[in-house]
Amino acid sequence: MTFTDAEVEYLRSQPLARLATRATNGQPDVVPVAFEFDGASFWVGGGATFPGTRKARNVSAGNAEIALVIDDLVSLDPFVARGIRVYGRAEPPVERVGMVGPGHYLRITPVESWSWNLTGEPAGDQWYETRYARH
C-alpha cells in the first residue's frame, strides 16, 4: 500500500518533521529535521558534517529503525491537529544533491504509517479517524 494523494500532498506541503533514532546503548533520540519526500522515500540530511550528527551515527551503527512524525496545528478553536507518523528503515548517509544542496542524506523507506485529519474537517467532539497503511 502507498500513501494516498491527500497524504502525499500534505507531506509535500510541510517543511519540518521530527526524527527519532536509537543509539547503540538503547537511548532514543528525537530531533526536528527538514525533510523531503520523493514519492517513495524520505530524505533527511545535508552538508558535509551531517555524517557526524547523532542521528546519522545511530543509523550507521546499525540502528536502522526510525520513527518520523510530520504534523501541524491548523487551529486552536476549534482544535484541529493533523499529521502523519511513519515507522521505517533508514540507510547510512549517501552523497546526493537534496533540498539544502549537495551533502550527505539518510534515505528512509517507510514500512508503516498512520495519518489523521487530512480532510480539513474539524474533529469537533470526536477524536480523529486514523488511516493505517503497510508500505
Image (cartoon, grey):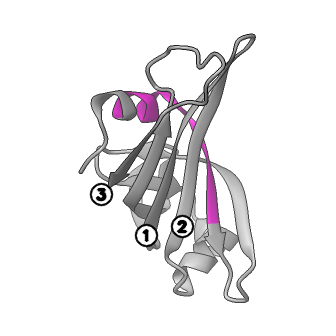
Q: Residue 43's x, y, as percent?
A: 44, 54
Circle 1 sits on which residue?
A: 89
Whichever of callouts 1 and 2 sits on the residue coming sooner in the sequence is 2
Tag nearer the camera, 3 or 1: 3
Magenta-colored span: 8-20
**Could you tell me how far apart the alpha carbons at marks 2 and 3 are, in whole angstroms?**
15 Å
Circle 3 sits on which residue?
A: 135
Residue 99 lies left or right of residue 80; in this view the side is: left
Q: Residue 126's x, y, as percent?
A: 61, 24
The residue positioned farthest toward the left in the image shown = 1
> Which residue is found at the position 55% from the left and 81% from the top?
63
Residue 14 within the magenta-colored segment of the rendering = yes
Q: Residues within 10 Å of mark 3 (few under 14, many from 20)?
A: some
Q: Nearer the viewer, residue 16 or 95?
A: 16
Whichever of callouts 2 and 3 sits on the residue coming sooner in the sequence is 2
Residue 53 within the magenta-colored segment of the rendering = no
> Which residue is found at the position 49% from the left and 77% from the top?
64
Asked which secondary structure carries label 1, the reply is strand
Viewport quadrant of the C terminus: bottom left
Residue 53, quarter of picture: bottom right
Q: Is residue 73 above or below residue 18?
A: above
Query: Are circles 1 and 2 on residues that touch, CB within 8 Å?
Result: yes
Circle 2 sits on which residue?
A: 66
The residue positioned farthest toward the top in the image shown = 77
- Residue type of the residue flagged with mark 3: His
Residue 20 lies left or right of residue 132; in this view the side is: right
Q: Residue 50's x, y, as percent?
A: 60, 65
Whichever of callouts 3 and 1 sits on the residue coming sooner in the sequence is 1
- Residue type of the residue flagged with mark 1: Arg
Q: Residue 49's x, y, as percent?
A: 63, 66
